[in-house]
Image: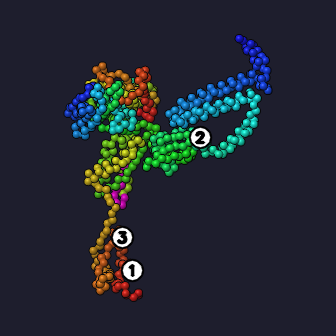
Amino acid sequence: MYGRYEIPFEYSDETIALSITEDGDFFRYTRQISGGESVQKTLLTTGNAIVTINPIEPVNLPKPVTHYLEIEFPPVLIEPEGKKIVYLMFPIEIGVIVFGNRKMEAVDIFSFCPQKYSLYGPSGGGVITKYYASDIFSSPPESDRYCNGVLRLEIHNKTTEWANICRTVLDGYSMKIYYGPYVSMLAHMKILTPTTAETEFVRNPAASEFQKAVEVYHTLNIPSINRTFLMEWGY
Amino acid sequence: MDANATFIIFESPIFTDPIYGQTTMANILWFFVILIIAVIVAKIVSLNLTRFLKDRVRKNDLNLISKAAYWVIFAIGFLTALPYLEVDLSGILVAGGVVGIIIGFAAQSVVANLISGIFLIFEQPLKIGENVLIEDTHIIVEDIRIFSTIGKTFEGIYVRIPNEKIFTTTIINYVANTARRFEYDVEIRYQDDASRAIEIIKALIEEEPFCLKNPGPSIYVDELASDGVIIKTRMWAPSEVWWDIRTTMLWKIKSALEADGMEIPFPQRTIWINPEERDEFPSKILPDAQDSGENHKQTHICCKSAILPNNRESSHYSTTPYNGPDEQEK
């Protein structure tokens, strides 16, 4: 399903049918998930538009209320000044993005994964997060590339104390998603003090065979500046 | 040119000789130097003020504030420079003071609103688009101006509130915090299983994306009420969507409980009819409006909650035959 298509196009497998078909002067987008309702939209385009279907930042459904992703996992202890790589799962949202005259727009966003939100921090001052509970793995786990992705998280304890970690919060505005055999993201988490940590994404794919997904959340693209999130209410 | 040469130039008659009255060329130069410095300082202050308030204040107010700052600084500079032109400020200050007092009294509320508006801009107890209660007025904020705040009620009515009132009254901001809690009292019958009801409600809350995972919901039997068992259901939702969730979850809970065979009890009273007392107590004979000669029996009804006393000889329960309205008083 993931990839670039010229319109009109049709895609279907046992779970989903996607198409953009010509209907007179219009183009009709249709999405039908088995057992679900059909979604239809009309596109007004000359027919030169390109459609990209790929995983996008998983913070949009059922409706966007935040741009943070929180992944909770069974607690792990990391030694003082220790550095360790762990693998977590994250939910996938799939975007159907149309490009025309060098501008893009997400025509449709859907997911096969249940949605849940949470609050990180206090109700006054904290942030709403898209919540996902994951197991923790020492190597990339098996995943359904249409439902779960794999986050490679490098945890670096910069303190001189053992740190107990059970969650990471990541900013959707700097998310770098790659897709290939599975959907992948790479991130760092630096433990700064007993209550604060800093997370940031890495702009590299897990392997050369992975393709960069089109991002829906844009920031100023300054390669030397990475956007970080300060987890100031514990980890 | 060394320092001595500079000194000599400023000591030269061109600078020291009076041009008119006691005013020299040096004084005029000082006047203009102070004015230029005042203009530069005013420009810098107004520019920085504009940058600082760009995202906090609407454009018209921003222009007003930056111009006011500019002219206040310029006026201070001008008044500082005036004595170099041999202008006596004491008369101006006295006249200005009197005029200031008069204007101050006349524009007291205007100035109060202006100052309150400036403090509101910095303190930011409310922002555009937020849902707030100011005194008794519930509004969605549409604009925060320098003298007043504009809002719209839920009925779509335009409301203008002076900033002084907002600054001095209690403001309840419903969406300032990221998340908020709401609760329901769900009542089920005594014969229904409360534990099962709690399980069902928990599962529903878990399924709903916007019922927050943390802080988690709180569901417990809160009261054994007269008509049923009350289950308190508390949950958190993002402030942005809490009303949508609040309005949909209650019906989902009701439907799910009913699908499991539980019912929401109606207010009820059990009425106990004691058949034995019918024989024990003689029936009252009631008059018939149509036929006074034909009498009817009245069934004796007892409420279950009103327990009958053992002493049946109590005067309350003694009955006397009644023979109609024509009977003479005893």
- How would you classify the magenta stretch by its main secondary structure? strand
Q: Please, which chain is the residue tagged with disc 1 on?
A: B
Q: Residue at 58% of width from left, 30% of height from top?
A: B46
On-image quarter of the C terminus of chain A: top left
Q: Please, which chain is the residue tagged with disc 2 on?
A: B
**Which residue type does callout 3 highlight?**
Ala
A49 sits left or right of A219 in the view:
left
A20 sits left or right of B124 in the view:
left
Front residue of B148 and B120? B148
Residue at which label 2 appears: B115
Q: Residue at 32% of width from left, 82% of height from top?
A: B289
Q: Toward which corner of the image does residue B328 lie, by quadrant?
A: bottom left
**Which residue type does callout 1 highlight?**
Ser
Q: Nearer the viewer, mark 2 or mark 1?
A: 2
The magenta segment is B225-234
On-image quarter of the N terminus of chain A: top left
Q: Residue at 24% of width from left, 31% of height from top?
A: A22
User: Within 10 angstroms of label 3, few (less than 14), some, or many (20 or more) residues?
Assistant: few
Q: Sequence-wise, which precedes: disc 3 or disc 1?
A: 3
Q: Nearer the viewer, mark 2 or mark 3?
A: 2
Q: Residue at 69% of width from left, 24% of height from top?
A: B32
C-alpha gap between disc 2 and disc 1: 79 Å
- Residue B242: x, y in percent? 39, 44
Residue at which label 1 appears: B315
Front residue of B171 and A73? B171
Regarding mark 3 in the picture, which secondary structure is present there? Answer: loop
Residue located farthest toward the left when viewing the structure as drawn: A14
| Residue B306 circle label | 3
Label 2 and label 3 in one chain: yes
